[in-house]
């Protein structure tokens, strides 16, 4: 899909994280802090670091309509080798069992393989947030075997088991290439019982909708992908589209912004709020800045005062009990069954 206008750095009236936050906070209705207080969860604090998430940059071979990173082939923000080494040093100072690598297409960052190798040497589980089509790019023929050899869990975005819905969100021809990549992964053992190579799919709705029930959606994806393409996988995450970046732009341009946010606010679930991923996750940006989550990172929301702001100053004890910065976009993680990088949470 060729990029149209996008929010970040393109001269759009909503450009920049601060302006996106302002637009969301100006919408009618209660704020997220008020809902947290009503639920007895204010102020929201971290309860440790179980997931060390690293966003290695915004370079991607795709330009998806829903992308909260505003990633694409024209982006130049990519993590340096020096910052990647700082990430590994910080990871070693935590008990976090998981390194979660995201982007962009994280595999296009030169530091990607070093992060995988370094984390595996530390005995940590590695998750790769993969768009699937990157596995088929020229020059990436050894990428899938590399992932398999290091026992990396592939977490692959596939909005639908239908070509029309997937291509509408991700670009013409993306579905067919995604299916080819899934068959490649299956051929290496990914998603096969007993292989030890987990393959997770990620579904996010096409349109201004909340995700359907995760268990039912997983069952349907498994049945349809097996029947139509002979593809198997281990599990499926349902993730709510966050009203930021390109998705915020789409909501605004289609007249769905206020209605969608009202829907998120009305579906606020205190049980989901209690388990939001930021409470057990630390997010590192491509430039080494620290954030509560990948969404806060894209909105340029820094950690609150009292916490280190850069991975070079990483302090696991302080960060594991920090107070978390929140805003109206956080309703995206607490609506209905909740949403996180690990799917529904309540």
Image (tube, rainbow, N blue to C red):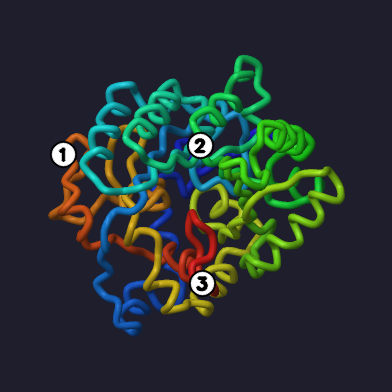
* Vertical order, 14 against 288 (above or below): below
Task: Residue 152: give its label.
Answer: 2
Residue drawn at (65%, 22%) of the image: 137
Q: Residues within 10 Å of mark 1 (few under 14, many from 20)?
A: some
From the image, tell me which residue sits under label 1. Answer: 313
Q: Secondary structure at mark 3?
A: loop
Q: Residues within 10 Å of mark 3 (few under 14, many from 20)?
A: many
Which x, y percent locates residue 106?
49, 32
Residue drawn at (55%, 47%) of the image: 246
Residue drawn at (68%, 44%) of the image: 192
Taking depth in this image into account, of 137 and 267 the one nearest to the observer is 137
Which x, y percent locates residue 270?
42, 79
Taking depth in this image into account, of 300 and 6 the one nearest to the observer is 300
From the image, tell me which residue sits under label 3. Answer: 335
| Residue lying at the far left of the rendered structure | 306
Toward which corner of the image does residue 1 lie, by quadrant? top right
Taking depth in this image into account, of 75 and 256 the one nearest to the observer is 75
Toward which corner of the image does residue 65 lie, by quadrant? top right
Which x, y percent locates residue 345?
49, 67
Is residue 101 rendered to the left or right of residue 165?
left
Residue drawn at (41%, 38%) of the image: 55
Q: Are marks 2 and 1 in contact (CB under 8 Å)?
A: no
| Residue lying at the far right of the rendered structure | 228
């Amino acid at each position: 899909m060729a990029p149209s206008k996008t929010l970040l750095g393109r001269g759009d009236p909503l450009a920049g994280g601060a302006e996106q936050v302002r637009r969301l906070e100006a919408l009618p209705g209660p704020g997220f802090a008020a809902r947290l207080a009503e639920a007895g969860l204010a102020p929201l604090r971290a309860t440790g670091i179980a997931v060390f998430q690293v966003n290695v940059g915004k370079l991607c071979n795709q330009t998806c309509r829903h992308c909260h990173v505003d990633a694409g082939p024209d982006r130049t923000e990519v993590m340096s080798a020096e910052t990647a080494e700082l990430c590994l040093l910080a990871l070693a100072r935590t008990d976090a069992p998981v390194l979660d690598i995201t982007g962009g297409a994280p595999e296009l960052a030169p530091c990607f393989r070093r992060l995988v190798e370094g984390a595996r040497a530390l005995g940590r589980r590695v998750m790769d947030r993969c768009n699937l089509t990157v596995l088929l790019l020229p020059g990436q023929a050894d990428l899938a075997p590399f992932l398999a050899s290091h026992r990396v869990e592939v977490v692959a975005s596939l909005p639908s088991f239908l070509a029309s819905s997937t291509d509408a969100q991700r670009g013409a021809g993306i579905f067919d290439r995604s299916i080819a990549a899934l068959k490649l992964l299956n051929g290496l053992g990914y998603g096969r019982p007993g292989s030890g190579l987990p393959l997770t799919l990620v579904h996010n709705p096409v349109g201004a909708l909340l995700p359907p029930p995760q268990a039912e959606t997983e069952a349907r994806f498994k049945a349809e992908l097996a029947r139509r393409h002979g593809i198997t996988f281990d599990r499926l995450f349902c993730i709510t589209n966050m009203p930021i970046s390109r998705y915020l732009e789409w909501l605004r341009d289609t007249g769905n912004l206020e209605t969608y946010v009202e829907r998120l606010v009305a579906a606020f679930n205190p049980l989901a709020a209690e388990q939001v991923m930021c409470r057990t996750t630390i997010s590192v940006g491509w430039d080494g800045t620290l954030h509560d989550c990948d969404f806060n990172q894209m909105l340029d929301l820094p950690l609150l005062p009292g916490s280190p702001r850069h991975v070079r100053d990483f302090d696991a004890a302080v960060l594991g009990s920090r107070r978390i910065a929140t805003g109206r976009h956080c309703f995206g993680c607490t609506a209905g069954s909740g949403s996180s990088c690990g799917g529904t949470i309540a």
